[in-house]
Image (spheres, rainbow, N blue to C red):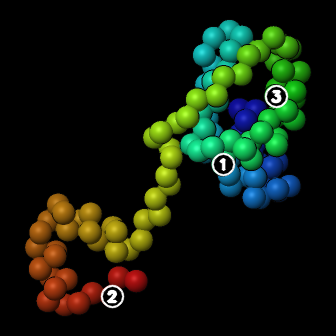
Amino acid sequence: MEWNLFLKQLQKKNTIVFNAVKTFKMVKSDEHQITVLFPSDSAKAEFDKISREFFNHFKTKVHNFSIEILYQRDIENLKIEVMTKRKIFEKFAEKNPLLKDLDDLMRFDLT
């Protein structure tokens, strides 16, 4: 919850850093350990700029100053794909090949 609250505040203060770290996930690994899942090294570099501020606030909030932070690359969230009308149509066309024939015939404008 604290991470989501911090992201909302960061979005107002610094949108560039917010966009870089919004896909980060915090997972409680152990009683005194948090794993930070990050998508790329460049995003982690942006996170390093704000991590001290966040973790100082977090440790104070939970009254636990012996928390260790582990960093792990999150391969699943490496790429956020933007779904365009063309990509949506192509996914439907994979399921129903008749849509591809209809597109060839009608020349849909899916831009």
Q: CA distance from mark 2 to mark 1?
A: 36 Å
Amino acid type, mark 2 = Asp
How many marks the image carries: the answer is 3
Quarter of the picture containing the N terminus is top right
User: What x and y, as percent, mark residue 61?
Assistant: 85, 22
- Mark 2 lies on a secondary structure that is loop
Image check: 23 left or right of 101? right
- Mark 1 lies on a secondary structure that is helix
Amino acid type, mark 3 = Phe
For the residue pair 4 and 42, the one nearer the viewer reads as 42
Would you identify the image quadrant in which residue 105 lies?
bottom left
Query: N-terminal of the two: label 3 or label 2?
Result: 3
Taking the spot 16% from the left edge, 74% from the top edge, the residue there is: 99
For disc 1, the neighbor class at 10 Å (few under 14, some 14 to 19, many from 20) is few
Res. 46 in view? yes
- Mark 3 lies on a secondary structure that is helix
Query: N-terminal of the two: label 1 or label 3?
Result: 1
Task: Return the residue found at the far bottom.
Answer: 106
Q: Is residue 10 above or below residue 75?
A: below
Q: Is residue 38 above or below residue 69?
A: below
Of badges 1 and 3, the one in the foreground is: 1
User: What x and y, as percent, mark residue 40?
Assistant: 59, 44
User: What x and y, as percent, mark residue 104?
Assistant: 16, 85
Q: What residue would you read off at disc 1? A: 42
Query: N-terminal of the two: label 2 or label 1?
Result: 1
Q: CA distance from mark 1 to mark 3?
A: 20 Å
Q: What residue would you read off at disc 2? A: 109
For disc 3, the neighbor class at 10 Å (few under 14, some 14 to 19, many from 20) is some
Quarter of the picture containing the C terminus is bottom left
Q: Is residue 44 above or below residue 13?
A: above
Q: What residue would you read off at disc 3? A: 55
